[in-house]
Image (tube, grey):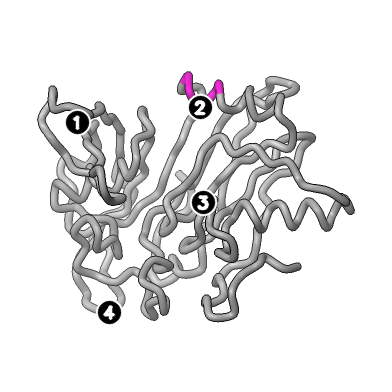
Amino acid sequence: MSDNQPLSQPEIREPLSILLEDGPLLAVNKPAGLLTLGAIPGIATLERRVKAYLKDKYQKAGNVYLGIPHRLDRPVSGVVVFARNSKCAARLAEQFRDRVVRKVYWAIVEGNVEPASGELVDWLQKSDDQAHVSVVNEGIAGAREARLRYRTLRTEIAHPVTGERCTQLEIELDTGRMHQIRVQFGSRGWAILGDRQYGSNLEFETISALDPRESAIALHARRLTLNHPVRYDEVKLVAPLPANWNAFPIPDEE
């Protein structure tokens, strides 16, 4: 199955992984390093891969419709949901907008996080000329409130190369701002492992991608809970951890 990927671009390390296909609802475990969507022809994206999958499976002659109610940052892995028709897309978009969807992430951060659980509240501002977010004071023009809750799953995780101590966290978003988890923890000295944009000094992958933009960081959209767009019953989606997490001994779901 072609994904229109240029020959010069390194292959994505993990194949397309379908978590759920139930009527118009489709859920995929996105590999880190892959854009969720993009407008530049010839660049591999999850959207293009999913469309190719649907076109091949259902032998569609024309264009494939795919609604995208949310996305993950390029270096982040985990659950992404899609809609196979416009009615489903509208219903999913409404759930995300009204914060009906429960979004839980797993992360490995540098250092020891204190307190072990709590809430982080900041005001974030996006840069006008680049994909970067900063913590600013409340009242600054363009700043938006960001809230999340976290709990520690494991402390004293040793980095496999340097031996430096890291902490595994479970994080639940109350808002969905650009780069929110990355900047809120990075600004406190607890950078997501491998996330050099927000202060990490350690590698997450033992072998870096040829293109730094395709490198993974230790942030994974672990669970997504929403209402089915047709039946309205609760759907809980769980994304298995990528293989590069195997270097860090972590507990099972708690």
Residue 103 versus residue 72 in the image, above or below: above
Pick whichever of labels 4 and 2 is earlier in the sequence: 2
Q: Quadrant of residue 238?
A: top right
Image point 13% across, 27% down: which residue? 140
Image point 64% across, 40% down: which residue? 82
Q: Which amino acid type is marked by label 4?
A: Val
Give the alpha-carbon distance from disc 1 to disc 2, as whole Å: 20 Å
- Residue 161's label in the rendered image is 4
Give the alpha-carbon distance from disc 3 to disc 4, as whole Å: 25 Å
The kind of secondary structure element at disc 3 is strand
Q: Which amino acid type is marked by label 1?
A: Trp
Pick whichever of labels 4 and 1 is earlier in the sequence: 1
Magenta residues span 94-98
List the residue tagged with mark 1.
123
Nearer to us of marks 3 and 4 is 3
Q: Which amino acid type is marked by label 3?
A: Gly
Expressed as whole percent of the image width and height from the top left, the position of residue 84 reads: 73, 37
Pick whichever of labels 3 and 1 is earlier in the sequence: 3
**Disc 4 vs disc 1: Cβ atoms closer than 8 Å?**
no
The kind of secondary structure element at disc 1 is strand
Give the alpha-carbon distance from disc 4 to disc 1, as whole Å: 35 Å
- Residue 96's label in the rendered image is 2
Q: Quadrant of residue 203?
A: bottom left
Give the alpha-carbon distance from disc 3 to disc 1, as whole Å: 26 Å
Give the alpha-carbon distance from disc 4 to disc 2, as whole Å: 39 Å
